[in-house]
Amino acid sequence: MSLKQQITEILEPILQTSKYYLVNLEVSNSKIRSKVVVLLDSDDGILIDECAEISRKLDEKIEETALMPYAYTLEVSSPGIEFPLVFPRQYHKNIGRSFKVIKNDGVEKRGKLTSVSDTHIVLEQEGKRKKNDTDATEYTIAFEEIAKAQVQITFK
């Protein structure tokens, strides 16, 4: 079993008693100093104090099991805006925000996220429309068609 899988197994019971779920876990092994990066989320976000608490619990378990014999750095945080969305449940809290979606076929769609269902998202094309144009272009994109979806920062 890989180190990543072992850390995931240690982390799962810690997360089961909370509202958080694992988005990503990366381990970079080194005999000098390994690094473990854990990205967590919840349906209503995560606070730094909560990340710190989970980090303490995970660190204790890693130490108890002597899983990492060398020095290591443990980082627990939220994915941040630069990290693509991974799970459908992450989209709900981002309704109304600008998105860039790259589909499996390579086609890129940009727009404001207007709705989310169990099977798809709906983006409304943003940008200037002609004066008499009241129709907004909407894109319905199934989750299975999404290769990468990322919140875009807009300055207005």
Image: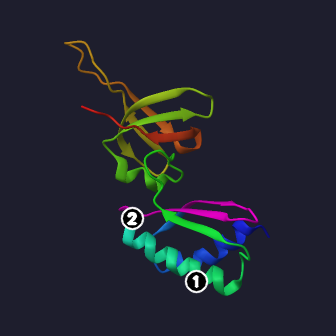
Q: Amino acid at mark 1?
A: Glu
**Which quarter of the figure has residue 154?**
top left
Q: Nearer the viewer, mark 2 or mark 1?
A: 1
In the image, residue 137 lies in the stretch drawn in magenta: no
User: Is residue 151 among what the camera can see?
Assistant: yes
**Label 2 CA crowd tier, 10 Å (few <14, some 14–19, many 20+):** some
Left or right of 67: which side holds 47? left
Give me the residue at 35% from left, 62% from top: 44
Q: Which residue is identified by label 1?
A: 60
Query: Is 108 drawn above or below residue 90 in the view shown?
Result: above
Most distant residue in the bottom direction? 64
Q: Which mark is residue 46?
A: 2
Which region is colored magenta? 23-47
Mark 2 falls on what kind of element?
A: loop
Q: What is the x, y in percent for residue 73? A: 60, 67
**Residue 29 horizontal/vertical position (percent):** 73, 62
Residue 132: assigned label: none
- Give the residue type at disc 2: Ile
Query: x, y percentage for residue 68?
Result: 71, 75
